[in-house]
Amino acid sequence: MNHSIALPVVLPALTACVLLLAAGNDLRRQRLVSLASVIGLGAIAIGLFAGAAGGPQAYLVGDWPAPFGIVLVLDRLSALMLLLTAAVGLAALVYACGGWDARGRHFHVLFQFQLLGTNGAFLTGDIFNLFVFFEVMLIASYGLVLHGGGAWRLKAGFQYVAINLVASTLFLFAVGLIYGVTGTLNMADLAVKVSSLPEGDHALLRTGALLLFTVFAVKCALVPLHWWLPQAYSAAPAPAVALFAILSKVGAYAIIRMHTLVFSADPAGVSTTLQAVLVPVAALTLAVGAAGVLASRSILGLAAYSIIGSMGTLLIAAAGLEPRQLSAAIYYLLHSTLVGAALFLLVDMIAASRGRAADRIVPGRMAHARVLGALYLVAGMAAVGLPPLSGFIGKVAILESVRGGPIGALAWGVILGTSLLLIVGYARAGSTLFWTPPPSPVGLVRARSLPALPTAVVVTLLAATAMLSVSGASVLTISAATVNELLTPGGYIRAVGLGSSPGPE
Amino acid sequence: MELLVASAIGLLTAVGVYLTLRRRTLPVTIGLTFLSYAVNLFLFSMGRLAVDQPPIVSTGRAAYADPLPQALVLTAIVISLGMTALMVVMAIRGYLETRSDEAAVRPGDAVRDFGGSTARTDA
């Protein structure tokens, strides 16, 4: 048994405890421990990513056999997500060390717990543990939203906690229904049991499964469940939001995982219903996101609505079970996570350099307008999907994969139409921020030197999207292999140690 | 008994949903507590309603209660207790800072700070 599969969960947990107990209030020591841990996490993720090429592997916690014990499963998709988490986590952490982490206590502890929950959600092979890791991730994120304090954060945080608690309750209802019908919560075991479910239980299973997907839709901020996102993301400190870029992708990951593994060939018709609902909802999400970008009065709102829009684009492709579509979706997922993180960090830098105008889209004086303007241009191009950056390749791959299919016309119309809206929205905000002269010369901004570390982080993230574009072919090959593995769930089920003797309980 | 448990879960959920949709923070918190009670009962009943049966293998017994939902409920209780405590603290802090217990965010509440370099040290 490969014990290193448990490391992405164990390492942040231990680091958080060390930070809490040993590092005390010494910020420098906290930063060192936290950074070392995330770099270690990156190294582990690279190792696991290399190892996952050989097929899915299961880690039986405590060596209890599969449907009874807790199981962690590593396959290509989870390894890819671990790698992405480590990369975005490192960027967010370095940015936070630029000063955000000094605004309150325990930033690094919460950050590590957030990584623990996220990594766990990607690795777990059990729905109830998915719930538990979701909770770990969310509880840490509640703390991070409130980091820095202030009435605004408290109120926005209250709404964020409330909506997520409602979602957690729905999650438990769904888990209960699924357990009541099938008698198991292990995903691989579910995949086996669902295919041989008696006719009379189909309605209950469908209810449970669709409730579960509703919960994932809340995490993905799909319309009409998206209202929490702009407020929570504008209230939270920038490095936390950069990490949240991966948090909304956990919902997309869960949808892809459950859909391909458990419900891809179920007789209860969950997959058909899901696809029939998800595609129009995702299209609507994209439209709302684009309209929000166009209507935003602050650049924070603009960034938040672009996240919503990107989730729409992602799920238009990820709703189906067609391999090319899913492969394009995984590419777009990588791209939108990196760009989302870069965008929020950049918005924080721009708002900090504009004095009282802060993040409002009004003309105002700005320090370092040239550098920040150039970065905004690149980030905007990547987010909108203009060539030569990765957003373009992602969108082309999605459009290409749905061409001639049943959702082709809808997807082409919505994705191309909203791209235009997004371009206009970004151009409008950018020209107001960087080109319109301020109405009066009062309100001079103190010209501090441009903070080097945060700038370097944003540049690195944007360079990563450029790399994603340059090595587009090989990344698409990786995502095609990932999808190939997802769509033949036999390997996953066998790795967990089930499926050889499918039969009644 | 099925009817009793089912209607209890339904009533708790209805109360929870109603209170969660209120605009003040305390009713929302209590509503979420009701929702978690409902879901705990629901999870419990998913192991089938069985009276007076052991959850652990013992000699001479043919029927058993399902122990797994009980373990799930235990986890759910722990999480919802912690979350309720957090929500109460947030509601109180929100009231103390803004002198209003409304859950809505108003533009006047906005204390916006950007960039990491202007370090503050308060919690």
Image (cartoon, coloured by chain):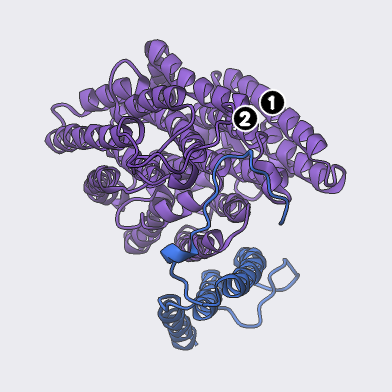
Chain letter tied to blue: B
Are the residues flagged by discs 1 and 2 in contact, CB closer than 8 Å? yes
**SS assignment at label 1:** helix
**Chain at numbered mark 1:** A
Image coordinates for residue B117, horizontal then vertical, percent = 64, 38
Instruction: State the mark number for residue A90.
Output: 2
Circle 2 Cα neighbour tier, 10 Å, few/some/many (<14 / 14–19 / ≥20): many
The answer to which of A399 and A296 lies nearer the viewer is A296
Q: How many marks?
A: 2
Question: What amino acid is labelled 2 in the image?
Answer: Leu
**SS assignment at label 2:** helix
In the rendered image, the quadrant that contains the N terminus of chain A is top right
Question: What amino acid is labelled 1 in the image?
Answer: Ile
The answer to which of A265 and A145 lies nearer the viewer is A145
Say which colour chain A has: purple
Residue under the point 32% across and 34% down:
A437
Residue under label 1, please give it: A39
**Chain at numbered mark 2:** A
User: In this view of the protein, can residue A130 be seen by the observer?
Assistant: yes
Residue A273 vertical position relative to residue A26 in the rendered view, above or below = below
